[in-house]
Each structure stands twice: as structure tokens, then as C-alpha cells.
Image (cartoon, helix red, strand yellow):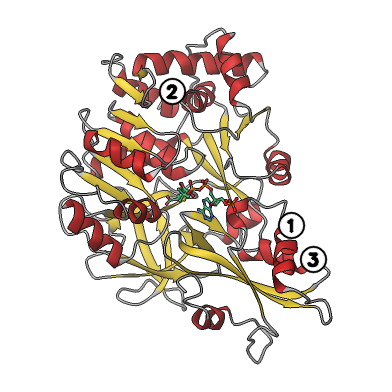
Amino acid sequence: MNGGFVGLLRQSYEPAPDRVCLRVPAGPAMTYGDMDERSALAAGWLRSLGVSAGDRVVAQLSKSTDGVALYLGVLRLGAVYVPLNTAYTEAEVDWFVDDAEPAAVLRDADALAGGLAGAQPCHDIAACGTDDLAALVYTSGTTGRPKGAMLTHGNLATNALALNEAWAFQPEDVLLHALPIFHVHGLMVALHTAMLSACETIFLERFDAAEVLACLPEATVMMGVPTYYSRLTALDGLDAAACSRVRLLVSGSAPMTAELHRAVAERTGCEVLERYGMSEALMITSNPYDGPRVAGTVGFALPGIEVRVCGDEGAPTVGRAGMVQVRGPNVGPGYWRRPDATAESRTVDGWFVTGDVGRLDADGRLTLEGRAGDMIISGGLNVYPAEIEQALDAHPAVTESAVVGLAHPDLGEAVAAFVVAEPGTAGDPDRLASDLAGTLADAARFKHPKRFVMVDELPRNAMGKVLKAELRARHADLFSK
Ligand code: MCA
């Protein structure tokens, strides 16, 4: 793997540089040759800014073809790409920058375009081995303090090759891409797999259901979070004719309900293929391309990857729920500058402990049954209750709070906060709710509770621990009322 992941990509598109790489509706198509040149400009520009191999480059940028060129330019130099959600606030970005200690921070798309315009291209591809770092992807911890999941060139390459094979990608495929490119899903699952086949990607700036539907007849593959599919099924036009060329619809990042799975199949004739992954280990399992895609399950370990489920006593078990563990070339080397957290996430025999609870059947098919922590997945984005609770509890009018995820028709789960007000300060609950939204000003908006519920007390067990399961059960229909 001399040229790392970019070297591998280049092998696939080099014979056909005129093939379309990214096509933005109403914009010019960008060929693989164009992308190669643009990424060489990005690498040259970064080098002129002093970035060299091993340095981190933080990018918080709206989605654009230049953003992809920048990513490839970073890898080309042997530097380390650190993508950040565009919803993160200044305070959050400051935290990530302190932690990653980057050589460059790019947050302005115009500055990027200007930089590329004046740059000298760097056509070299740095020699990168399997274990060289390619990206840091931040994930929050149960304590609310984010950790940078390290991913190597070997992780990226082997996972893209595995997906390419498992999902039968061909150069003739056309990928419809509406995902953000600051997460593993949009960048390393969708784009990598398509680029490794040198196929065309219809590159949309964001997910707009009507626009996606209008593009669908040209596509052969689409990937999305369940919310994409529920928004599409709400439109009249989603039918077999709209999907006449589609051979594969993939869903991930959050569980898809059996009801939604069925609805998409009835409307389009396509059974959605659900797969399972996480930032620390890229894609882990997938429903089969050929063979039954069972709703509510996430399928089988991808080629070259091992999955086991361990019960409370730590021994592998089949047919019973336990902790999902994974081993293989997809698993990253750990958390950036956090040997403690890295060690905690491994078993003594070297398996990565995902934190998800699941059940394997005798054939090796995995069903996820929940998460060990309280993490909420809202519209495919992870939200950690501890972070929000800590901010709410700091408000003088709040005695304590509990943040949970409750079923939501659009987002799958949405964030709800149960708040006990300090005696004598409750006053107007609406007023307090708007005050609390202000208290969360440092947190990205998608993490903010969609509802604040004032309660007299939180349910607790005999040990004084807040019973979140009870809150979830009691208020299960909060967002459907
Ligand atoms: C936006 N908002 C949200 C979310 N997204 N609230 C809760 N959960 C969300 N996911 C809020 C905004 O803060 C704003 O609120 C309001 O909704 C409108 O914002 P807008 O950006 O217009 O929303 P949208 O375009 O409708 O976005 C919803 C979305 C988007 C399309 C579902 O969140 C999305 O693309 N999600 C996919 C994320 C993804 O790629 N996840 C993969 C990571 P206000 O008005 O109050 O400010 S997981 C991963 O990579 C792992 C490895 C894996 O396995 O895939």
C-alpha cells in the first residue's frame, strides 16, 4: 500500500480519467482526472501553509466538490483529516482544535476556493503504510467529553474494498449522495465505495426529499439514514418508476423500523439493505446483497471481519443478548491521545467493544437490541445526554434534569429533557424552557431538546439512580401526541 488510500483510489480511476466523478445538478460535471488535479492543488496549497505528513487538518465546511478535493489532498500529503459537523458551535470547535492540535483549520469555503485558485499542484502521493493515520473522527463519550477515533489508511482501504465487494459496485453505477461529508457514512461509506469503482456520484449539497426524489430516476444506488427514507415515503412520487434504475438502497447510522422497511419495499419494489458500523470501526456488518434482507437485523460480518457477542460473564454466546465485539482490519488503533479510553474499549484478547447490545443467531446474523449507555440517535446524529444534562443543571433555576431519547416520527428518536425546577423559581414553564435553550448556546442545535417537560421529581431506584427507562416508558408518545 505504497500510496495509502489515495494510491488505491488512483489505481481504480487511472485507466479512465474522463469518467464523471461528481456531478452537481446545474453545475459542471467533475471527472476523475479533474478531481485528481484539484486534490493535487489542495495538497500543494496545504503544503504551502506548512502542513506536512502526520499533521492534522481540521475542516468544518459546507458540502462542496472542493471539500472532497481537500480531503483527498490531505490524504495525499500523508496528513490527517479531521472533519467537523457544520452544526458545531464556536465553543465546540475550539475544544476540537485544542484536542487535535492541527497545523491548519479550514472553516471558510471561499478561503478554500481562493487557496486552491492560487496554489501550485503537488502531484506526489506520500508513501503511506497500512498503519499510518488518515483521519480522526470525533465521537462523544458517555461522560460527554468527545474522543477522536483514529482511522488508518489500512482501515479505509480494507473497508472500502469490503463494501465494494459486498454491495457489488460496478463502474456503471450512479450513486445518489445527499449525506453530509463530515461523517463516516457520507465520506467513507458512500464516497469511498463509489470512487473505488470509478463510478459517478450525483452530489447534492444537502438532503432535500423533493430534490432527492427528482434525481432518483438517474441513480442505481442511494445511501441514507432512516429519516431520509421516511421523508421520501411521505412524497407521492416515490414509486417503482422513480426507482426503475435503482438496484440498491442502503440504510444505516440509526435503526430502521420494520414498518418503514416494509413501506419502502411496497412503494419501490426495493428491499432496503441495513448495515451496521461506527466511527471507530467503519462498517462492521451488512445484510446480504443476494439473500434475504431481514428488517430489524443488520446482517452478517463483512468479508475479513469477525463479530462476536459476549454475555455478562464475558464468554461468547449465540442466541442470547450481550455486548457486540468486533475484530478485523476495519478496527482503528484507538482514541487520539487517550490510551485510557483506548484500553477501556478493548478486551484482553484484543476485541473492540462496541457498546452496542445485540444477539447473533446460529448463522451469524446480528440483531441490535440497544445500547449499553444512554446515547440517543436523532436523525442519524449521536447525542450524549450527559453533555446536555450538565449544561441544564448549571442553570440556577434547575435542581436537576434527565435527558432521554423518545420515539419521533421524523427523526427516529428525538431529545427530550425532564427538568425539576428549584423551589420558587418554576414560574412560567415556557419561559424557563426558552431560558434553558439559551443555556445550551454552546452546544450544536441538533443536540438541543425538542421538548422540555417540567416535573416535580425524577423517578429513581432504591440506590437513588434516575430510572431513564421509566421516563422513556412513561413518556413514550410525547412526540406523537
Ligand atoms: C437537523 N436538526 C436536527 C437534526 N438535523 N435535530 C435533531 N436531529 C437531527 N439529526 C435541526 C437543526 O438543528 C435545526 O433546528 C432544524 O433541525 C433544521 O435544520 P436542517 O439542517 O434544515 O435540518 P434537515 O436538513 O432537515 O436535517 C435533518 C437530516 C440531517 C437530513 C436528517 O440531520 C442529516 O442529514 N442527518 C444525517 C447525519 C449523518 O450523516 N449521520 C451519520 C453519522 P433549529 O431550527 O432548532 O436550529 S453516523 C456514522 O457515520 C456511522 C459510522 C454509521 O454507521 O453510519
Q: Amino acid at mark 3?
A: Ala
Label 3 vs 1, first from the N-terminus:
3
Crowding at label 2, few (<14), some or many (≥20) Cα neighbours within 10 Å? many
> Disc 2 designates what residue?
3
**The residue positioned farthest toward the bottom in the image shown:** 462
- Determine whether label 3 and label 1 are within 8 Å by CB: no
Establish if 296 lies above or below 128.
below
In this view, the residue in front, 179 or 43, is 179
Q: CA distance from mark 3 to mark 1?
A: 12 Å
Query: Is disc 1 placed on a helix, strand or loop?
Result: helix
**Which is nearer the eye, 213 or 13?**
213
Q: Which residue is mark 1?
A: 438
Element on which disc 3 rests: loop
Q: Earlier in the sequence, mark 1 or mark 2?
A: 2
The residue at the point 49 percent across, 50 percent down is 280
Q: Which residue is mark 3?
A: 394
User: Left of 28 or right of it: where is 362?
Assistant: left
Q: Is residue 157 above or below residue 377?
A: above
**x then y, percent, for residue 420:** 72, 78
Kind of residue sitting beneath label 2: Gly
Across and down, in percent, residue 104 comes to 67, 27
Disc 1 residue crowd, few under 14, some 14–19, many 20+, Cα 10 Å: few
**Residue type at the position of mark 1:** Gly
**Residue at x-position 51% and y-position 70%:** 372
Seen in the image, is 334 located left or right of residue 421? left
Residue 166: image location, x then y, percent:
24, 45
| Residue in the picture at 35% in, 25% down | 23
State yes or no: discs 3 and 2 in contact (Cβ < 8 Å).
Answer: no
Q: Residue at x 26, y 39 (%)?
A: 216
**Residue 162 appears in the rendering:** no
